[in-house]
Image (spheres, rainbow, N blue to C red):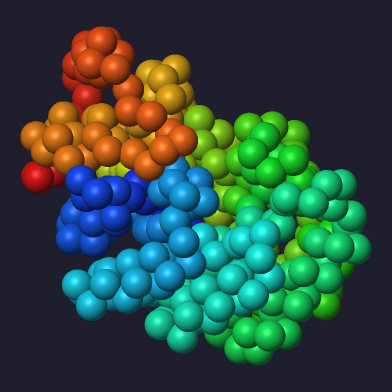
Amino acid sequence: MSSKRFSGVLAPVITPFKEDLSPDAQRLAAHCQWLVNQGVGLAVFGTNSEANSLSTDEKIDLLDQLIASGVDPALMMPGTGSCSLTDCVRLTAHAVKRGCAGSLMLPPFYFKPVSEDGLFAFYAEVIERVASPDLKIYLYHIPAFTGVPIVVPLIDRLVKSYPENIVGIKDSSGDWGNTKAYNAGGWPDFRVFCGSESLLLQNLQHGGAGCISATANVNPAAIKALYNNWQTAEAEKMQQQLNPVRNIFQSFPMIPALKAATSLYSDDPNWRRVRPPIMTMSDDQVSEMQSQLEALGFDMPELSG
């Protein structure tokens, strides 16, 4: 990874919870360290982190505890977006102060329709209030969840106004045409990440920077291997080997499935917990998922409870 702008593979790190549903910082730190050892970066407080079920105070506390545990903030791209301008500014400023190399920023999505001018004003206000040359924002396009698309003309306005702060985007639309359009935007050193490793090879072939993928929580080394070898003759085969694993996980509710797999392969039942309104998978679903993964020879090496 660049110390200035991210590239490679990042995991939107799943968040473990204690029995009272408070965040479990110790387990989170251990999972982050395992991911780093597997070669991927840390998009903590992403969608699959259950970030919108966490308060700003909880995120700040978790970030501080991760850093205190020895997790390098230069490897972190925390999600700092919020419908609340002041919460977004507070969390983003804290991430910058603690040395995080970037912030992954959802658009404010509650009031709809959200105009392009409104989105520009929101991001501009965040940048002006944080007021740091170290602020690196990676926009987050996930219209299925937010209902608020981040369109090319908006990116163009933001990059031209704040070229040192607006540095990339995560495209979780699943629409290759959209990701391709981002790559064709012509913005200097603008980093485009796809939201699934199923598009990783295509993204890299079109100038993309990598992927920020839910399944990087459970299959990090294999995804990073494709990133490292995308220009080799083996790249297409490696892509085809990644796809069945991704397909299994996305055939189940994604967050409970990621946590169930982590629980299985670490032999730690505490990983099964999710915060309502998300619900855990049934035992039958977990058994079915485990059978499918075992048929592929899937493993999470060196993971421990």
Q: Quadrant of residue 189?
A: bottom right
Percent position of residue 254, x then y:
42, 30
154, above or below 176, in the image: below
Q: Is residue 203 visible?
A: no
Q: Quadrant of residue 25?
A: bottom left
Q: Is residue 97 visible?
A: yes
Q: Residue at coordinates 21% horizontally, 74% vertically from top-left?
A: 70
Q: Nearer the viewer, residue 134 or 227?
A: 134
Percent position of residue 141, x then y:
67, 48
Q: Residue at coordinates 44% horizontally, 17% vertically from top-left?
A: 251
Q: Residue at coordinates 23% horizontally, 56% vertically from top-left?
A: 24
Percent position of residue 203, x then y:
60, 42
144, above or below 240, in the image: below
Q: How many marks?
A: 0
Q: Looking at the image, which residue sits at the far front?
A: 20
Quadrant showing the N terminus = bottom left
Quadrant showing the C terminus = top left
Residue 158 falls left or right of residue 268? right
Q: Nearer the viewer, residue 279 or 206?
A: 279
Residue 65 falls left or right of residue 46? left
Residue 140 falls left or right of residue 251? right
Percent position of residue 43, x then y:
44, 57
Q: Quadrant of residue 33?
A: bottom left
Residue 21 falls left or right of residue 267? right
Q: Residue at coordinates 76% horizontally, 46% vertically from top-left?
A: 148
